[in-house]
Image: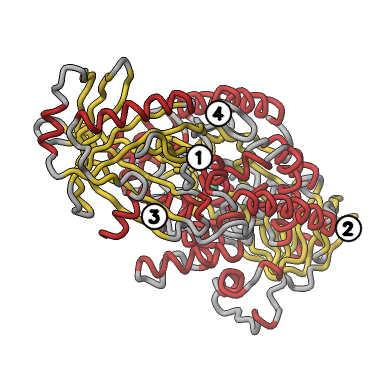
């Protein structure tokens, strides 16, 4: 007696990707509703089942759909926006400012639909995502008919969808409650990374994931710098740190794991964490080489992911699978490691297990969901065909097939692509809408890049304020005389400090942009030791406001902020035309003179070695106050016995430039 099913796919080379890597050629698969009812030799399946729809696969490879184990799908809309930059400049300088400006539920939906078109075309049936407004990702994926694990991001920084951590946490909870139990969507919580969260965020998100029994998606040990900083701050590498916060109470999906040691690999294994290996992203951002072979040997579920399209720049899993194999071979200097069948298993069954979805997808087995694809492996670039070794079938897919060879895709028993035609998406319309968004982002960045000030503001978290600076600077021969004169009764010393100062001036093509100064102040104690280091960023107006009195200068500083990034970051972000480095030893007195607070700086120039300078300085917010202080500064120059010195206020940087 034959049993009725919905669809039978026959005349195929079936790669089940099950534990035994069973193949059937010619093979067939019977599908009823959302499930695979049977997989086997064609004759047996056709004997046993009768279908409403019979699909002749024409000898193509029939295999489980690919699992993209780590991505940020809405970032298709940022693809190719800025490349060839270091991770921090790329992320903090470009991605985050643009995201703050543009990312909305509509942006996320459009980006996701565009990504789904690309994913389906390249044979992906399940993806694991992490982004903002994840509800829109989930809705778009569900509308298209794709399977997805959708992770709502939680970070310590303000995000496009949450001004504070508490908001993103509330959003994550709401999101999980809404989507839990959906046939295609698995909601998850995504604390972005250990360095963008706090111990509290890690603990709370793990508890949330546990409460609803959903996965927790996080970036782990992506760069050597991340591990180095963690060791410095916490005295341990990243995996033990997150373990300490209770992260492994949840079903963890750890993206990257590039810089993990054997102990960390064992910890990940012991707690059943899944790993996503992202070869293109790691290569492009020069993050390093993940110990894939060691992780596989330890029995970890290592899947393969594309990472976001802004750091890859595509969602092509065939490319990732090939790279996963090639890189593992080269890095271990052994061409036998990660053979084709292993690489393909990572992209299917292991990937599904890494996402904690191994019981429903990742292989063609009776009872699992019908997530499957057809690949044409008889094209010119994949001919001829050898049958001798069963592994030839995997080699064809991993080493020669291209994503464009995928012809048909079914998810949850429903066709999403037939004969390379997308059935649930209007691709032309999506491309047009994406171009509209790209034009807007282009315009935003073009405007921003025109000014040093707006580039500074775009970094966020800084304060913009305009202030006046009263300054007189004199070259002196005898600093001891000034120190002595400071003891005069009419001068009251409020505080004294000694600094070693390192100034980097950035100069730009157009002078009206001003000069940007990165200053590192090292506070020195009596024992000549550095006790505190702080960095500040100041945008100095090029145009002087003019002289007050005869030798006192009034200048405007347009922007002042603590420098939260490294000098290297600012250099690569601002790309100055020229740079000037100054090093000096500064004695700094905070004094009161005629009921007015002023600063007296006595500088000994070290680099360039051009002697001693006395400077009287005060910052003020009103011009009238500036005029009064200018007069006092002038008097002080006389009082400190420096009136015979050469006034260099106006052309101080010119003096230094010449001496350089
Ligand atoms: Zn990522």
Q: Is residue 634 left or right of residue 410?
A: left
Front label number (1 vs 3): 1
Foreground pick, 62 / 283: 283
Residue positioned most to the right: 52
Give the spatial CA distance, label 1 vs label 3. 23 Å
Measuring from the top left, give residue 547's x and y in whole percent: 42, 39
Of the residues under marks 1 and 2, which one precedes in the sequence? 2
Name the secondary structure under disc 2.
Answer: strand
Of the residues under marks 3 and 4, which one precedes in the sequence? 4
Residue under label 2, please give it. Answer: 53
Front label number (4 vs 2): 4
Residue under label 4, please give it. Answer: 209
Front label number (4 vs 1): 1
Q: Ligand 1: does it lie within 8 Å of the C-beta at label 2?
A: no
- As drawn, 239 above or below 442: above
| Residue at position x 80%, y 43% in the image | 143
Give the spatial CA distance, label 1 vs label 2. 42 Å
Identify the image quadrant of residue 147. Answer: top right
Name the secondary structure under disc 4.
Answer: helix
Foreground pick, 538 / 38: 538
* Residue 218: mark: 1
- Mark 4 vs 2: CB contact within 8 A: no
Q: Residues within 10 Å of mark 2 (few under 14, many from 20)?
A: few
Residue under label 3, please give it. Answer: 297
Measuring from the top left, give residue 468's x and y in whole percent: 45, 32
Name the secondary structure under disc 1.
Answer: strand
Give the spatial CA distance, label 4 vs label 1. 12 Å
């Amino acid at each position: 007696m034959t049993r009725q099913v919905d669809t039978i796919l026959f005349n195929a080379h079936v790669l089940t990707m099950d534990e035994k890597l069973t193949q059937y050629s010619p093979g067939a698969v019977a599908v009823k509703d959302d499930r695979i009812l049977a997989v086997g030799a064609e004759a047996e399946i056709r004997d046993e089942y009768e279908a409403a729809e019979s699909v002749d696969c024409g000898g193509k490879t029939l295999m489980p759909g690919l699992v993209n184990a780590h991505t940020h799908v809405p970032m298709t809309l940022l693809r190719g926006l800025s490349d060839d930059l270091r991770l921090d400049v790329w992320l903090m300088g470009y991605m985050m400012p643009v995201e703050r400006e543009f990312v909305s539920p509509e942006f996320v939906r459009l980006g996701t639909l565009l990504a789904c078109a690309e994913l389906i075309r390249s044979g992906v049936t399940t993806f694991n995502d992490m982004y903002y407004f994840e509800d829109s990702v989930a809705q778009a994926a569900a509308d298209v008919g794709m399977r997805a694990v959708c992770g709502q991001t939680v970070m310590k920084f303000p995000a496009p969808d949450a001004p504070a951590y508490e908001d993103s946490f509330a959003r994550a909870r709401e999101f999980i409650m809404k989507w839990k139990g959906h046939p295609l969507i698995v909601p998850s919580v995504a604390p972005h990374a250990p360095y963008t969260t706090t111990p509290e965020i890690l603990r709370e998100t793990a508890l949330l994931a546990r409460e609803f029994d959903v996965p927790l998606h996080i970036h782990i040990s992506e760069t050597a710098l991340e591990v180095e900083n963690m060791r410095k701050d916490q005295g341990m590498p990243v995996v033990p740190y997150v373990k300490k916060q209770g992260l492994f109470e949840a079903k963890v999906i750890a993206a990257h794991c590039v810089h993990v040691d054997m102990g960390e690999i064992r910890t990940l294994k012991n707690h059943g964490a899944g790993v996503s290996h992202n070869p293109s992203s790691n290569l492009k951002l020069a993050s390093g080489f993940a110990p894939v072979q060691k992780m596989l040997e330890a029995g970890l579920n290592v899947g393969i992911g594309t990472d976001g399209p802004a750091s890859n720049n595509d969602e092509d899993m065939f490319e990732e699978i090939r790279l996963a194999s090639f890189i593992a071979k080269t890095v271990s200097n052994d061409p036998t490691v990660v053979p084709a069948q292993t690489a393909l298993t990572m992209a299917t069954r292991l990937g599904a297990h890494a996402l904690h979805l191994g019981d429903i997808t990742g292989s063609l087995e009776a009872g699992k969901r019908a997530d499957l694809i057809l690949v044409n492996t008889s094209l010119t670039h994949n001919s001829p065909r050898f049958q001798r070794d069963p592994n030839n079938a995997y080699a064809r897919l991993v080493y020669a097939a291209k994503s464009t060879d995928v012809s048909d895709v079914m998810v949850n028993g429903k066709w999403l692509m037939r004969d390379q035609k997308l059935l649930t998406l209007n691709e032309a319309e999506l491309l047009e809408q994406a171009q509209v968004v790209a034009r807007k982002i282009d315009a935003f960045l073009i405007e921003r890049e025109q000014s040093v000030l707006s580039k500074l503001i775009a970094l966020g978290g800084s304060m913009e304020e305009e202030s006046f600076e009263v300054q007189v600077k004199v070259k002196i021969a005898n600093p001891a005389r000034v120190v002595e004169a400071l003891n005069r009764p009419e001068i009251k010393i409020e505080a004294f400090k000694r600094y070693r100062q390192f100034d980097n001036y950035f100069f730009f093509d157009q002078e009206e942009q001003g000069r940007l100064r990165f200053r590192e102040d090292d506070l020195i104690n009596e024992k000549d030791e550095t006790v505190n280091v702080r960095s500040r960023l100041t945008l100095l107006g090029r145009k002087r406001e003019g002289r007050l009195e005869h030798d006192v200068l009034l200048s405007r500083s347009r922007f002042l902020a603590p420098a939260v990034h490294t000098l290297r970051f600012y250099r690569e972000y601002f790309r100055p035309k020229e740079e000037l480095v100054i090093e000096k030893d500064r004695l700094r007195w905070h004094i009161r003179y005629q009921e007015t607070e002023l600063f007296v700086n006595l500088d000994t120039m070290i680099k360039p070695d051009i002697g001693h300078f006395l400077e009287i300085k005060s910052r003020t917010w009103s011009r009238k106050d500036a005029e009064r202080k200018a007069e006092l500064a002038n008097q002080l120059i006389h009082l400190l016995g420096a009136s015979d010195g050469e006034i260099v206020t106006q052309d101080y940087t010119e003096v230094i430039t010449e001496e350089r």
